[in-house]
Amino acid sequence: MAGINPDWRDGFLFVGNQLALDFVNTRPIMNGQPVELLSDWEALLRWFRAAGLVSKKDMKALGRQWEKQLEAGACLEKLRVFRESLRATVLRLEAGAEPASKTITELNRLLRAHPLLSEVRRTERGLAQQRFFEPRRPEDLFAPIVDAAAEMLVNLHPGRLRRCESCILHFYDTSKNGTRRWCSMQICGNRSKVAAYAKRKRRRRSE
């Protein structure tokens, strides 16, 4: 599936249209059971590579440098805990509620502890200020995740945060009319259409 479906990159799903949601989706339900895609330090670095946050060269270097360090394992566990806290916040937003005050407090603490850097770079369209991060220690990996979480809370319309009708994956609806129902047409959309077609066919047979 990963080689055919563009929603899969190196074994990870990217259907959220927003980095924080894609991070939440690293623990999907498969065959009725939750599956931990961030199973170890190497998997975490592969996700960062698949998300376009680090280069392949940097991914390998960071793996060699940190793989056997206790700090790396502790960071992985902290990121998983933050992911589940973020999932709870997304569910609140999807239900029409405000994020909890303690969530904002913790997010602000993480933003102060792990800020993104910025610099002016030349692009094809001229000069542009671009943000980036330098992972010099494991917990620096928090920087792009907490920044994306803040961006989700501040800039995204909560009414367009959705959970797929067919699975637990979350996404931000960027469609023009705001009626997207599935995490992906390739994953759940086609499955739902096939199921609906089969149901109509059974109904016609019984009439």
Image (spheres, rainbow, N blue to C red):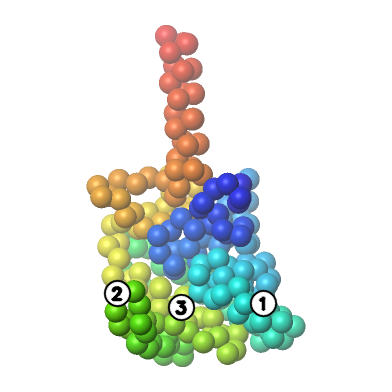
Say above or below: 3 vs 206: below
Q: Quadrant of residue 158?
A: bottom left
Q: Which residue is mark 3?
A: 144
- Residue 107: image location, x then y, percent: 41, 81
Closer to the camera in the image, 55 or 63:
55
* Mark 2 / mark 1, whichever is N-terminal: 1
Q: Quadrant of residue 28?
A: bottom right
For the residues bearing labels 3 and 1, Cβ distance under 8 angstroms: no
Say above or below: 81 vs 24: below
Residue 151 visible to the viewer: yes
Q: Determine crowd level at label 2: few under 14, some 14-19, many 20+ residues with C-alpha closer than 10 A.
A: few
The kind of residue tagged 1 is Lys
In the displayed structure, does residue 189 sit left or right of residue 36? left
For the residues bearing labels 2 and 1, Cβ distance under 8 angstroms: no
Q: Which residue is mark 2?
A: 125
Q: Residue at x 49, y 43 (%)?
A: 186
Q: Residue furthest top?
A: 207
Q: Quadrant of residue 197?
A: top left
Q: Which residue is mark 1?
A: 60
Closer to the camera in the image, 118 or 21:
118
Which element is circle 2 on?
loop
